[in-house]
Amino acid sequence: MRNAEMLRPLPAALEDPETQRLSSASRPAPSPTAGRTVRLPSIVIGTVANTVRQRYADLSVVSDVPPSRWQIARVMLVLLLAAMPILGISVDVFGLVPQATTSVVIIALAAALATVVAFAPHRIDMIVGRGLIAGMVACIVYDGARLFAVHVLGLMDDFIPVMGSWVTGEPDTTGSAAVGYVWRYIGDGGGLGVAFFVVAFALGIDRWSNVKAVGAAVAFAVFPTWAGLIATVALAPRGEDMMFPLTPATVTITLVGHLIFGFMLGLAFLKAPRGRAGSEWPWPPLLETLARRRRTA
């Protein structure tokens, strides 16, 4: 009996009006868009005017105004710093200035240039960065062939660890060997890459054909780079004792290595933005400027 009373329906007065079902007559008519996907209007939050690279430097503008004295000094500082590691070898071999001294000067100049780049960035900084990385990669590939001739074929000794002792000023040790290779890749290889990239863009080699641009890089690796190395070994009084003896094998190995270095450097140069529309060099190339002056003279 008690269960039957519990199942008895509630009085109408106790029913919640919010829970009452709507009759079919009072139901709203179905919307004409029911069952279809309705695209909401898009909301434009903002537009990105420039990419990070474009905000750093407007690459679409090439100024006809020649560089200022400060800009020329900046380029000269870059070229000086790029050339000092490789020139420091010749200076040390000829007995003029120890490389331990020139390395301190190079580090100080690198710190000064890094400060300038951090507080006064310029478009050519991207060229310097590309050249540094390209030179390091090209030097690593070059060393792959050279070390094969050293450790597998036994045609010459590895003189890079000895050069590391010149930088540290300490005897030939494992630590000096590590310093020698780090200095070789960043200082020698990276410096040569920076020098070629800056000079190539300044002259307008980036507007040459691919074959001519790679040929220019190979020529740069042979002369003055390889020719300067051989001249240092041949002309310095202790050149062969400090570096390596001049034999047909060593001359051939070093020449082939520099050809590989120049070829890889040229391929990396082709990957940089080039030509009139995409060049990162902010001023007219020197070769085109000279040709224009000759025509108007």
Image (cartoon, helix red, strand yellow):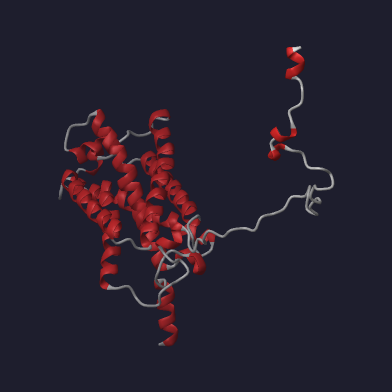
- Residue 128 lies, with reference to residue 176, above or below; the image says below
Q: What residue is at 30 percent from the left and 57 percent from the top?
A: 117
- Residue 63 lies, with reference to residue 232, above or below; the image says below
Q: Nearer the viewer, residue 297 or 241?
A: 297
Which quarter of the figure is the C terminus placed in?
A: bottom left
Q: Looking at the picture, how far across and down is residue 248, in whole percent? A: 38, 41
- Residue 14 lies, with reference to residue 183, above or below; the image says above
Q: Residue furthest top?
A: 1
Number of numbered markers: 0
Relative placement, left or right, of 209 versus 226 is right
Q: Is residue 216 visible?
A: yes
Q: Nearer the viewer, residue 257 or 38?
A: 38
Q: Is residue 237 visible?
A: no
Relative placement, left or right, of 52 versus 192 is right
Which quarter of the figure is the N terminus placed in?
A: top right
Q: Nearer the viewer, residue 293 or 89?
A: 293
Q: Quadrant of residue 194?
A: bottom left
Q: Quadrant of residue 281?
A: bottom left
Q: Looking at the picture, how far across and down is residue 196, in whole percent? A: 38, 57
Q: What residue is at 41 percent from the left and 43 percent from the top?
A: 252
Q: Looking at the picture, how far across and down is residue 217, in whole percent? A: 44, 56
Q: What residue is at 16 percent from the left and 38 percent from the top?
A: 169
Q: Nearer the viewer, residue 102 or 63?
A: 63
Relative placement, left or right, of 97 versus 147 is left
